[in-house]
Image (spheres, rainbow, N blue to C red):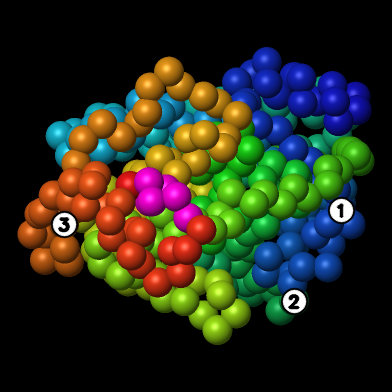
């Protein structure tokens, strides 16, 4: 079985995205982040993605329903129902071919002591976004979201480690964030800060108390601090509508943007006000005013 055949089987099982990061892409990582620390014979990391329905964001966007739309359909059921079945069944196929397969969730809990073995350690924490980039599925955006050309930020990720040697992908660098600060301008808490090199840092402490659609997530999730449906994530969704592969008949954003400050006080910003703020923001030259609405 080659990489192309494996991808076809993964998609038949329910994967929307499938990529392979071969050993040379990650074998020099520190041991606490290295797949070889989990599986010494690992030759390939298979990165699986399932898209998040755009409709799963609708209740949060309208400020009318959080848990039964995004909480279930956008997050929990992907992580704890759909992905385990997909990963397990694909691992079965690999082992039927005579190759060991280690299915893994999108995140790893913090490490534990090395169980009394001096040269061992506890849980190795793989960087799933790094591995997804190495597998050619997309790249990290300016605001800390993993972006794919098909769905933008609307996907969740999981892994399979295997000793089957597979042809790896070329990393894919997207330019979605060029001249765009949608997620940064949308944050009501000012959690982003610009670094001297033009990149941005994120105050995870503020994200943890955000009341604008941020979810606590799980250490087993690819988004342990889940901002995909928060103000920043939904602004990213709006900004990428005309850039990604999956198109819709109607625009996502229909009405004024609600937001809450750090104390939970709610306010509404009309689309016109939002566009005016973006147009007058520092560094706004050359941007379309609606990109951050």
Mark 2 and mark 1: Cα distance apart in space: 22 Å
- Could you tell me if residue 136 is visible in this image? yes
Q: Position of residue 121 (x, y in %)?
A: 65, 71
Q: Residue at x 26, y 31 (%)?
A: 254
Give the camera-side residue of 260 and 82: 260
Residue that badge 2 annotates: 119
Q: Quadrant of residue 20?
A: top right
Of marks 3 and 1, which one's residue comes earlier in the chain?
Answer: 1
Give the camera-side residue of 269 and 123: 269
Tag 1, which secondary structure? helix
Q: Position of residue 27 (x, y in %)?
A: 84, 62
Residue that badge 1 annotates: 23
Of marks 2 and 3, which one's residue comes earlier in the chain?
Answer: 2
Q: Which residue is drawn at 56% across and 54% down?
A: 177
Mark 2 against mark 1, which lies toward the viewer?
A: 1
Task: Specify the farthest residue to the bottom.
Answer: 196
Q: Where is residue 4 in the image (x, y as percent from the top left)?
A: 85, 25
Q: What stretch is highlighted in magenta?
A: 287-292
Tag 3, which secondary structure? strand
For residue 260, the mark is 3
Up-down relation of residue 160 to residue 254 (above or below): below
Mark 3 against mark 1, which lies toward the viewer?
A: 3
């Amino acid at each position: 079985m080659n990489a192309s055949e494996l991808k076809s089987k993964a998609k038949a099982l329910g994967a929307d995205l499938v990529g392979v990061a071969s050993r040379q892409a990650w074998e020099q990582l520190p041991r606490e982040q290295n797949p070889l620390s989990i599986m010494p014979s690992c030759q390939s990391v298979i990165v699986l993605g399932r898209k998040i329905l755009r409709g799963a964001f609708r209740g949060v966007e309208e400020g009318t329903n959080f848990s039964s739309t995004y909480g279930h359909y956008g997050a929990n059921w992907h992580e704890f129902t759909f992905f385990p079945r997909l990963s397990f069944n694909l691992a079965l196929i690999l082992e039927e071919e005579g190759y060991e397969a280690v299915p893994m969730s999108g995140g790893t809990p913090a490490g534990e002591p090395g169980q009394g073995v001096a040269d061992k350690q506890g849980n190795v924490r793989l960087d799933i976004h790094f591995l997804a980039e190495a597998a050619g599925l997309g790249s990290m955006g300016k605001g800390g979201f993993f972006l794919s050309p098909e769905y933008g930020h609307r996907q969740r990720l999981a892994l399979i480690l295997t000793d089957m040697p597979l042809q790896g992908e070329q990393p894919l660098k997207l330019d979605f964030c060029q001249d765009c600060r949608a997620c940064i301008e949308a944050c009501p808490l000012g959690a982003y800060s610009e670094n001297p090199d033009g990149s941005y840092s994120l105050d995870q402490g503020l994200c943890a108390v955000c009341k604008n659609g941020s979810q606590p997530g799980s250490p087993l999730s690819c988004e342990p601090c889940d901002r995909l449906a928060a103000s920043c994530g939904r602004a990213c969704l709006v900004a990428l509508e005309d850039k990604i592969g999956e198109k819709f008949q109607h625009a996502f954003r229909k009405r004024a943007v609600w937001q809450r400050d750090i104390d939970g006080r709610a306010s509404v910003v009309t689309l016109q006000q939002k566009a005016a703020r973006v147009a007058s923001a520092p560094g706004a030259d050359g941007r379309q005013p609606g990109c951050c609405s």
